[in-house]
Image: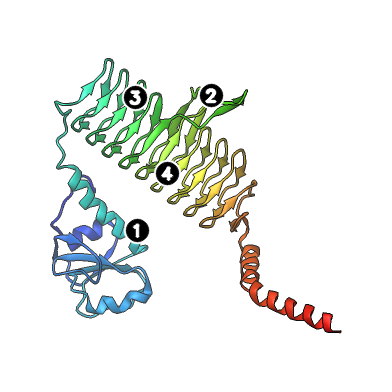
Amino acid sequence: MSKENLSFPLKVEEIAQIINGKVDGRKEVVIKNVTGLKEAAEGDISFLSNPKYVEDLHTTKASAVIVSWDLKPISNKTIIRVKNPYFAFSQVLNIVFSAKQNYIAREVHKTCLIGEGVTLGKNVAVGAYCVIENNVEIGENTIIYPGCYIGVKSKIGANSLIYANVTIREEVYIGNKAIIHCGAVIGNDGFGFVPFEGKHHKIAQIGKVVLEDEVEVGANTTIDRATCGVTHIGQGTKIDNLVQIAHNVKIGKNCFVVAQVGISGSTEIGNNVTLAGQAGLVGHITIGDKVIVGAQAGVTHSIPENTVVSGYPARPHQKAKKIYALMQKLPDMYKEIQEIKKKMKKE
């Protein structure tokens, strides 16, 4: 069964078909809403992914629960068994989300300013007070919420969501199924200046930004255009709120960039990399595939693939943990040294 154009209410057996699950219990039960185990009421569907919450399964009022294949049978509970309950639950949430998008009028609001040579695909929605400059292309089924600005010669692919008050400057390319959250700025000038004769002289930023398919950009995140060339974000990469990505940065596929991360110019990041919250990276370094950078880490040099680092300056995680463990002992060590010095003076 296709998830396209579905909405609640749905029968349990219909949901099971969508998420490739097997029903234990009443297949004909009608589901009207999706929520957590503790908050659920009759008519809701929920999920159990973490075994430590199994007691909530016995007390929940949910009419159906998505669980793993190996969970023991639960009497008087309608359950849907799947390979990955969390992923299956996300698929059910997507049904709710898609239904909400269908409430939006697929039209260009009369208050919008649309330039010359603009191409709008089939079923595009453009909300109130948007400005779309000359020679912009927007793919079919894309939704642009109110108050957005899209600059000259920019291109947005199909089935994308551009939330309210997003700024997409000139010559920015955004792929299909992208999500850009409120207040994000894509393609602003990179921070480039030349010191000369006591002044900072601006370097013109004439490059571009490319976001490949299925990239998500969080609220108030900024991705700067390249000085020359391209600032590039790979397919499937997810970027959290309040992230700063500088000019000429290259990020690979399927990366996670968590809130308040700062990436300096011309740094290259591989595929499947995780940058945890508030990590900072200096410019002109390379981060290999599958690297994990811990929260608040300060990365001052290149990191080889398959490495986990943390701390400031960032070191291999196990080494960093030992250093911090020893740092906790410094006050006691200081006292011991002072006592040894006193003894030595008496002798």
The structure residue drawn at horizontal position 36% and vertical position 42%, both measured from the top left corner, is: 220
Given contact means CB atoms under 8 Å apart, are the residues at marks 4 and 1 in contact? no
Give the foreground label among 4 and 1: 4
Q: Residues within 10 Å of mark 3 (few under 14, many from 20)?
A: many
Residue 347 percent coordinates (x, y): 86, 84
137 over 53 or under it: above or below: above
Given contact means CB atoms under 8 Å apart, are the residues at marks 3 and 2 in contact? no
Q: Quadrant of residue 320?
A: bottom right
263 over 35 or under it: above or below: above
Label whose residue precedes the other's in the sequence (3 or 2): 3
For mark 3, give the secondary structure: loop
Give the foreground label among 1 and 2: 2
Residue found farthest to the right: 347
Distance in Å between CA atoms under marks 2 and 4: 31 Å
Label whose residue precedes the other's in the sequence (4 or 1): 1
Q: Which residue is mark 3?
A: 151
For mark 1, give the secondary structure: helix
Distance in Å between CA atoms under marks 3 and 4: 24 Å
Dot label at residue 203: 2
Tag 1: residue type?
Phe
Q: Which residue is mark 1?
A: 87
Distance in Å between CA atoms under marks 3 and 2: 21 Å
Q: Is residue 1 visible?
A: no
Tag 2: residue type?
Ile
Q: Which residue is mark 4?
A: 236
